[in-house]
């Protein structure tokens, strides 16, 4: 998810997306622990998306 897409979301949508993507990341990590993923780069991109969403939420709280 691109930063420009994240900025367009409302705060409620950001929180919802963050919960969904955190769960997706946990599922990917579990699947990777059991058997290596076909595309392990998914872990990195998902983790970075979580960070982008969390950063945007924190930025909005501080304003």
Image (cartoon, grey):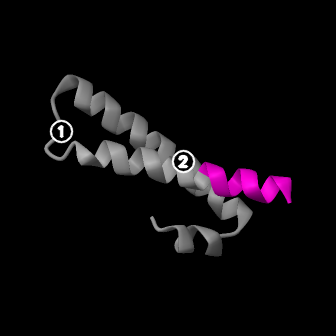
Indicate the position of residue 39 as horizontal and vertical percent values. Answer: 18, 47
* Foreground residue among 60 and 33: 60
* Residue furthest top in the image: 34
Indicate the position of residue 11 as horizontal and vertical percent values. Answer: 72, 62
* Residue furthest right in the image: 63
**Quadrant holding the C terminus:** bottom right
Give the mark, 2 or 1, whose residue is nearer the N terminus: 1
Residue 15 appears in the picture as rendered:
no
Label 2 to label 1: alpha-carbon separation: 21 Å
54 left or right, relative to 11? left
Magenta stretch: give its range: 54-63
- Mark 2: which secondary structure? helix
Q: Nearer the viewer, mark 2 or mark 1?
A: 2
What residue is disc 1 on? 37
How many other residues sit within 10 Å of disc 2, few (<14), some (14-19) or many (≥20)?
some
Indicate the position of residue 38 as horizontal and vertical percent values. Answer: 13, 44
The residue at 62%/49% (across/down) is: 54
The residue at 41%/34% (across/down) is: 26
Rendered position, 54 above or below 10:
above
Secondary structure mostly taken by the magenta-highlighted segment of the chain: helix
The residue at 35%/45% (across/down) is: 44
Q: How many marks?
A: 2
Indicate the position of residue 27 as horizontal and vertical percent values. Answer: 36, 36
- For residue 51, the mark is 2
Q: Is residue 59 magenta?
A: yes
How many other residues sit within 10 Å of disc 1, few (<14), some (14-19) or many (≥20)?
some
**Quadrant holding the N terminus:** bottom left
The residue at 53%/67% (across/down) is: 3
Q: Is residue 30 magenta?
A: no
56 left or right, relative to 30? right
- Mark 1: which secondary structure? loop
* Foreground residue among 63 and 43: 63
């Amino acid at each position: 998810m691109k930063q420009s897409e994240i900025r367009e979301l409302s705060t409620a949508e950001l929180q919802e997306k963050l919960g969904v993507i955190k769960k997706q990341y946990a599922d990917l990590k579990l699947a990777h622990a059991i058997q290596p993923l076909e595309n392990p780069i998914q872990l990195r991109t998902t983790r970075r998306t979580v960070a982008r969403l969390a950063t945007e939420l924190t930025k909005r709280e501080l304003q």
